[in-house]
Amino acid sequence: MAIRYPIIPNEITIHLGKPDEAASNITVPFVDYIANVASSELYPTWPTDSLKANILTIISFAMNRIYNEWYHTKGYSFDITSSPIYDQTYIPNRSIYENINNIVSDIFNNYVVKGDQVQPYFTRYCDGRQTTCNGLSQWGTVTLANQGKNPLQILKYYYGNDVNIKYNAPVGDAIVSYPGYEVGLGDVGNPVRAIQRDLKRIKLNYPAIPEITGEEGAYDASTEAAVRKFQEIFSLPVTGIVDKATWYRIKYIYNSVKKLSDIYSEGLSPEEADFSFKDVVKYGDTGIEVEFIHYYLGAIAFLDNDIPNLKTNSVYNDNTRTMVTAFQNKYGLTPTGEVTYTDWNALRTTYDKLLKTIPSEYAEFANELYPGYFLSKGMSGNDILRLQRFLLTICRYDKSIPGIRVNGTFDDLTEQSIRKIQNDYDIIETGLVGPLSWEKIVELSKR
């Protein structure tokens, strides 16, 4: 299970003012940001346990903003503001108290969680004298610390007994959820999984959105219908394609209905944060991502002498790594031998161009090339016609296949025939046609 747990970012981008105020954005190291806010909002003379409890709330508040992409979902290009009305007080170039800086350096990669929720808890707080709120009282922590309570006990006093501290979270570059490309019919992977998860939850508040009934992680006709209705409800262009605007609108509504940035949040469970597809595919991996990589690389290598056309199987092996590295070198990517989202996008783009520019001497093979996306029930068009013609040829000699109507629509009979072939040839039975199923169907049609 590949759960998307929060990563402490190396850097954070701050808007020096209120969200809509004309002000500069600056990017600073995350640890420096926390030390600055703590020095701006806390007194260095407070007890150490009081300071630790407060600094944990400052870290968790900032992490909640980043993890939920609070401002990015609203169309802004920053992570947080410097305004205490909206976020936390940040004062550029201010001096940092030494004892506060030492505490921050020690605990900057810890944050507060609630129950079994994955996201950093929205640790709302106020000073406790001039303002009060349903959250932590900064001055109140001093009293509690003087009574001998430790930081966790202080946090539990204000946020409930089910809060805990997540220690030693990994540090790295912040993960932006938008994959960098438009997601639509036939796509597969974590971006599709995220869209489906979000829309299923949003549907509880907006029941007009149709049910998503297909395979999880595959963008089928039911997912497209749900996206179209979402776009219609929220006054977006009704395309059925999830571009950047639709992506962040979906995420904004999802965050809102679950109250992920609220002290009384519904929360994000480990199951909801489970992503079946890896963000980085590497040596020894198996699965649908590896199938895609092998198919794309094999097709590209067939026409590009700079990419060695080596034998591959169902495992990401030495040959895979050699081919991936050659591809990365050819297309100006970092030659790691592993496949990230950036490499994946380059593979997709290169393969799509290949489909459109087949040399005339290879034209006879063009019909056999995988269309580059998953085919599923409810789709229609020329690629479905190609698939059905291959299936019809198979049906003529294999009478166990349910049958086929060559009508250009992926209907029930088409799905039943595909499932029978997948079952007969030890391919995971999904009824979807990905690269492995396509290759097997083309191969069988030639018998």
Image: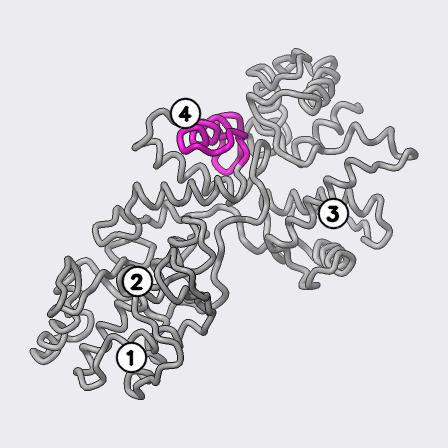
Residue 175 lies, in percent from the top left, at 48, 58
**Outermost residue toward the left in this view:** 147
Residue 287 lies, in percent from the top left, at 58, 45
Location of residue 257 with respect to 2 vertically, above or below: above
Q: CA distance from mark 2 to mark 4?
A: 36 Å
Q: Which residue is mark 3?
A: 297
Q: Is residue 196 magenta?
A: no
Q: Which residue is mark 4?
A: 210
Q: Which residue is mark 2?
A: 87
- Residue type beneath disc 4: Pro
Query: At 47% from the left edge and 35% from the top edge, which residue is drawn?
Result: 216
Q: CA distance from mark 3 to mark 1?
A: 53 Å
On screen, residue 326 versus residue 40, left or right, reads: right
On screen, residue 344 versus residue 350, left or right, reads: left
On screen, residue 117 versus residue 435, left or right, reads: left
Helix, strand, or loop for circle 2? loop
Q: Nearer the viewer, residue 185 or 311?
A: 185
- In magenta, the rendered stretch is 214-241
Give neighbour class at mark 3: few <14, some 14-19, many 20+ (Cα, 10 Å). Answer: many
Of marks 1 and 2, which one's residue comes earlier in the chain? Answer: 1
**Nearer the observer, disc 1 or disc 4?**
1
Q: CA distance from mark 1 to mark 2?
A: 15 Å
Residue 289 lies, in percent from the top left, at 60, 46
Q: Which residue is mark 1?
A: 39
Give neighbour class at mark 2: few <14, some 14-19, many 20+ (Cα, 10 Å). Answer: some
